[in-house]
Amino acid sequence: MPEPEARALRLLARRDHSRAELRAKLAPLAESAERLDALLDDLEARQLLSDRRYASLRVASRSPRLGNTRLRQELKSRGVDDATIAATLPEAGEELGRCRAVRERKFGDLPGSAEERARQYRFLHTRGFSPDAIRRALAGGED
């Protein structure tokens, strides 16, 4: 088995990778870009490599702690295309519910002061939740 293929199989045995991630890891070992593309195409044909599966697993593992903006950014930075991202983000579930759960786990009670409210807002914004979801989570109540 040629070295790039063996390396690809070892990497995929550990965890799923996006096509772009695997390409970056295998590029130094490949004889040419064409051979690397052929290898990646073969792995996709054998269903060992799938951006859709990678995105679904990534969303499933990261969505309990992160908002849609952050999930989208992480997938984009790992080379997943916009269509695949748009197809997998709904699997994360309702953003408001996740935002409330993250806020409750981190801070407990609703903010009592403007300073505490700003602190919680910044934290949730950094986690990638939308401004609307954050405002509604900080307002309390069930809407």
Image (spheres, helix red, strand yellow):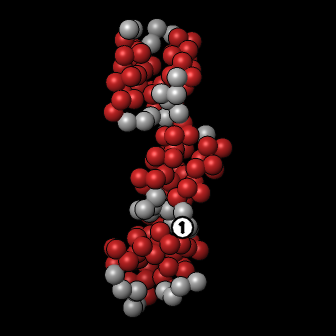
Q: Quadrant of residue 34?
A: top right
Please tell me whether residue 136 is drawn above or below residue 45 in the rendered image: below
Judged from this view, the residue extending furthest toward the front is 46
Q: Is residue 45 left or right of residue 29?
A: right
How far from the left and from the top, in percent, is residue 82?
63, 44
How far from the left and from the top, in percent, is residue 44?
54, 25
Task: Tell me if I can see residue 109 in this picture.
Answer: yes
How far from the left and from the top, in percent, is residue 112?
39, 91
Q: Residue at x 43, y 62 (%)?
A: 64
Instruction: Answer few, some or many: residues within 10 Å of disc 1's Cα (few below 14, many 20 plus, some between 14 and 19).
Output: many
How far from the left and from the top, in percent, is residue 117?
43, 83
Q: Residue at x 45, y 19 (%)?
A: 27
Residue identifier under label 1: 95
Task: Tell me if I can see residue 20 in this picture.
Answer: no
Q: Is residue 93 left or right of residue 106?
A: right
Please tell me whether residue 138 is drawn above or below residue 72 in the rendered image: below
Please tell me whether residue 68 is drawn above or below residue 122 in the rendered image: above
Q: Residue at x 34, y 78 (%)?
A: 107
Please tell me whether residue 75 is drawn above or below residue 140 in the rendered image: above
